[in-house]
Amino acid sequence: MTYPNTDETIQLIKELVSIPSPSGNTNEVISFVENLLKEANVDTYRNRKGGLIATIPGKDTQKHRMLTAHVDTLGAIVKEIKPSGRLKLDLIGGFKYNSIEGEYCRIETSTGKFFTGTILMHQQSVHVYKDAGKAERNQDNMEVRIDEKVKNSDEVRALGIEVGDFVSFDPRVEVTANGFIKSRHLDDKASVGILLQLIKQIKAENIELPYTTHFLISNNEEIGYGGNSNITPETVEYLAVDMGAMGDGQSTDEYTVSICVKDASGPYHYAFRKKLVQLAEKHEIGYKLDIYPYYGSDASAAIRSGHDIIHGLIGPGIDSSHAFERTHKDSIENTTKLLYHYLQSGMVE
């Protein structure tokens, strides 16, 4: 039994987080994944929402499985070009303005031009603004300083920048010598990397799966509806592979696979959760059970949309989610191992 190489998975994650893909503008990263799977001789197709579905036929074609991970990320969109030549933003996804203060960013125009900038408080300079530290971090006070010689809105528009242009955040990805990977957008590109490595191994080693299995790389999860369609009528089990949330009162850590018991949508399927725990214990895989209080997944979106499925949620533990994220190679490895055994196991009874 050989698991996918964790160091190779981390290198793939580095590539993924470095491709800008805020919800609503994910074609580049979907194309990257599409080409990677094509090289692995995996059949794929895109749905109308722009997500990618890969299918591996299994021994049993009457019962299907679906696994999903999302490649869209948090980001922003230009709301207003201010008279000063700075940009006012509207956020894409559930996060707070304070988590992007001081961040480098990229503005993509509708004509395909790119400009860089920095997200700052309007009252940034402590030498000028008495309330620089106290002012609220919100839409009115935060703005993008564009790295161009612009002094007013007309000069900004002359560059081709306009309301509706997408703004993505610099991931600042780094892998440390002791196994940590820190970067924005590990939610959920860490899990996308894990699934892609597993798919490649299944194809390379001609592993026969017990059931036809679909892998959805969704592209609208951060705005709530990435994985609620393209679920075949034969699909029985639907497993979202996302991130485990860490913080006060949480058991999830950066070294194990997190198995979600309940999130803001309610409990996940009890028998499915118990099966995942049994697989982890049987194969000596480090895991934690947890509740994510302010969280929803593609699996919960699928349930809300009316699909008659058994739903579950697992993922690597991610510190400082929706901000300056970090995990460890041990968590990547334990998540990979659980998925490896799950894909070759029987259905929940």
Image: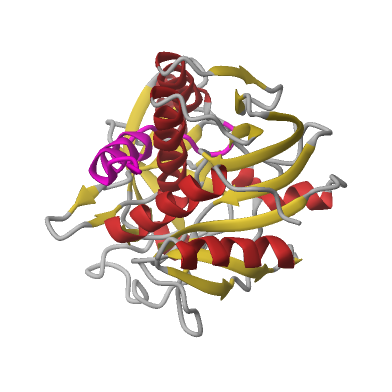
The location of residue 32, given as percent across then percent down, is 42, 22
Q: Is residue 86 left or right of residue 326?
A: right
Per the rendered image, the range of residues in magenta is: 1-24
Percent from the top left, x then y, of residue 158?
43, 20
State the scheme by which the image is colored.
Answer: secondary structure
The answer to which image quadrant residue 284 occupies is bottom left
Question: Is residue 60 visible to the viewer in this orientation of the structure?
Answer: yes
Front position in the image: 302 or 20: 302
Q: Does residue 240 belong to the magenta stretch?
A: no
From the image, which quarter does the N terminus lie in? top left
Whether residue 18 appears in magenta in the rendering, the answer is yes
Residue 145 in the figure: left or right of residue 234 = left
Which residue occupies the foreground of this view, 238 or 291? 238
Quadrant in which the C terminus is drawn: bottom right
Choose top left, top right, bottom left or bottom right for residue 259: bottom right
Of all residues, the one furthest to the left in this rendering is 177
Q: Position of residue 42 (x, y in %)?
A: 51, 18
> In the current view of this chain or complex, which residue is farthest to the bottom?
249
Relative vertical location of residue 185 with respect to residue 45 in this rendering, above or below:
below
| Residue occupying image coordinates x 50% and y 25% | 30
**Residue 224 can be seen, yes or no:** no
| Residue that appears at 74% across and 63% down | 269
Question: Residue at 35% across / 36% down in the picture?
Answer: 151
How many marks are shown on the rendered structure?
0
Q: Is 13 located above or below residue 293 in the figure?
A: above
